[in-house]
Amino acid sequence: MYVDVILPLALPENLTYSVPDELIAEINVGCGVVVYVQNKMYSAIVQKIYEDQPKPFTIKPVISLIDKNPTVNRQQLDFWNWIAEYYMCTVGEVMNAALPSRLKLQSKTHFSSLTCNIDITEREAELYSIIERERGITLQQLIKKSDRKTIIPTLKTMLEKEIICVDENIELKYKPKITTFVKLSRTIKNEDDINEKINLLKRAKSQEKLLLYYLSLSENIDFANPVRIPKTLLLSEAKIGSQVLNVCIEKQIFEIENIETGRIETEDMETHDLQKLTAAQQNALDEINENFKTKNTVLLHGVTSSGKTEIYFKLIETQLQQGKQVLFLLPEIAITQQLLVRLQKVFGNKVGIYHSKYGENKRVEVYNNVTGTKTYSQRYSVITGVRSALFLPFSNLGLIIVDEEHDTSYKQRDTAPLYNARDAAIILAKIHSAKTLLGSATPSIESFYNAKRGKYGLVQLNERFGNVTLPKAETANILNAFAKNQMNGHFTKPLLDAIFTALKNREQIILFQNRRGFAPYLQCADCGEIPHCKNCNVSLTYHKNTDNLRCHYCGYSVNLYSTCESCGSRNLNKKGLGTEKIEDEIKIIFPKARTAIFDADSMRTRNAYIKTITDFENQEIDILIGTQMISKGLDFGNVGVVGILNADSMLNFSDFRAHERAFQLMTQAGGRAGRREKTGRVIIQTCNPENETIRNVIDNNYDNLFARQIIERKDFCYPPFFRLINITLKHGNINILNQAANRIACNMRTFLGDYVLGPEQPAINKIQNKFISNILLKINKNASLNKTKRMLRQCISHLQTEQMFKQVAILTDVDP
């Protein structure tokens, strides 16, 4: 028997291995196996099984089987293959993204010394003495101990001289949680035995106390199956040390039992019935169900605070009654915790959560809980999470809900696979014969277009829950305020008046500025010099809380300069506006207001997310200052004012989606205001109050935005009328980079003609010491996308066969 396996490596095709006789009866598609790749061991997933040898050359055997139960089911494998094909990456790269890291095993190289009876160099002698002293040392440890980074050539020479040897050991990364329980000894079989033990302990008061406390926690003693009590709980409640327990074990009063319990709470939760829908919500729900009879995908276009979540809950309830699973996707980790609490109040511990801020071991347990194959696990029926939750091993999926479907966070960036979770969710649902519901107050142009032309069902919900009115939006003219000397820092008088009134009425305020840090750059007032990152072609951002300059692309940081590095001047000015500077100014203007920042810098841990959201919900924060993270579906009941500090910065991007995204961000941010009884206010600071997109935000006129955008998209050959593929090339030598980019662009022009744009360097043309060049391909919807991809793959393959271009990194982004 032979198997094709998927490895967590960017290999152009899967590798084939033979199956040892002892594993033939146990191996199945989807099982995890351990195999050798170039003398290194990896875990792999079985994708295909053959009876006869498929390739006419020597094939290595599978080393071992990780688990008889498949790690990945057939629907997952189909999904992985679709992503690899559509997004032009390898299945190994998809596997790397799909599985929790602790389910992917990789061997470590260990070095040991052999007898040395020959002359060796000083450098070899230094390494030999370390290896001899610390037998089994890893390569990473050896580099650290020797304080040398280039030791691999020396190690190769030592291996050739046979004075050291290597050993490859695979290490299990996932460690199940083991809980120690205490129970009555099996020698105690009845009440008489208990009384005898109590009498025996009359002079050992601590031991007697421990036994009596155990009995008090065991209401009805079943001597055949005595109650197990966690050791830590028993000792802490009884206020007795472990040495007393050890003596009781020696006296055969207690026994210890270690059980794999897992890290996820499984206790039953108190749940509540779903609240009754309003007439508008019920009509929307009925329309969704009616659309699902003929459409696999439905778009729910509901204004902010219209109660879309309650409709989602009703749909989830229906799926659970049918024994189906539901995946509830959200764009940001920040929202998942708030939604989890709401879901668990209704559906209890049937609900699980999955995202990257979860600990690695917990992610493995959630993964296992979805399959329901582990004896300690419960099976989740509802999973809420961000885009990575798509890769969980669902077996009976009935519905996928993609909330805030317009959000750009659903698109994976930088590392393959560069998939869009919204689009991939539709395919995953199709594989499972399930339905997909897309929800948004500001749908993407592509989704709304698909709904308008009948590809998706369309349901609209145009009134807020409880007949609450939409927030009153208005503009504040920055140019006029500067001309009249009415600016206070970066705040216009209308915005400051609105904040003052809200604080007076004990309402909360959200201030939106889509730039983190204190100041985007530092500039010398004498010579104009701006400090740049040494690795990237971008200015360093000043962060006041750490008092340093930091690059947001590679993490490089330096202490704040006291003098200009170019001319020596001390006249350095902090330019621009970030979230930290807004907080600084707010504290000066409103010294008694309690403030917090909600951006990627301040929310680096899961606990930071939870604490800030909880504090704001509990009204322990008066003013929350944040980037686009605060615009994504968070539900706060006491927000009276939302201030958008600089609307123009969102509109002036060289991106065909700039106005669409600006509308979405401003509308969504404004939608956080006035979500209960009172009407909220949204103040938009701008230099151009008559800008059409800003007027559409003020009037909440999505239809007008869509009508204008769809004409422009058609005229200039952009989605939804054309598909896009962006090719990003990176290399340390700009001349080699330009030659490679020109070669690909010229080859593709023979196929696509003028629909090839570039190559051109982006605004930030160097990141992490790699120069960047982009090529954009436009493919007519009537043309063959697969044919274009085949042509592109051939161009890239031919290019990378040449020695000169082998180190050029090429990243292909389909639907950028």
Image (cartoon, helix red, strand yellow):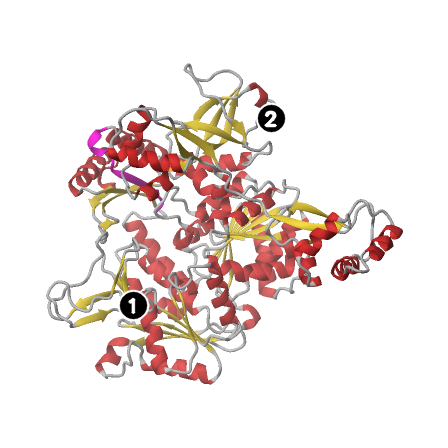
How many marks are shown on the rendered structure?
A: 2
Q: Is residue 639 above or below residue 325?
A: below
Q: Which residue is mark 1?
A: 547
Q: Secondary structure at mark 1?
A: loop
Inspect the image, locate mark 1, and give the three-letter code of the amino acid beneath it: Asp
The location of residue 79, given as percent across then percent down, is 49, 38
The location of residue 600, given as percent across then percent down, is 39, 61
Q: Is residue 803 magenta?
A: yes
Q: Is residue 582 magenta?
A: no
Q: Label for residue 672? A: none
State the residue at coordinates (41%, 44%): 419
Q: Label for residue 26? A: 2
* Frontmost residue, 581 versus 679: 581
Q: Which residues are magenta?
A: 802-816
Inspect the image, locate mark 2, and give the three-letter code of the amino acid beneath it: Glu
Q: Nearer the viewer, mark 1 or mark 2?
A: 1
Precedes in sequence: disc 1 or disc 2: 2
The location of residue 731, given as percent across then percent down, is 23, 41
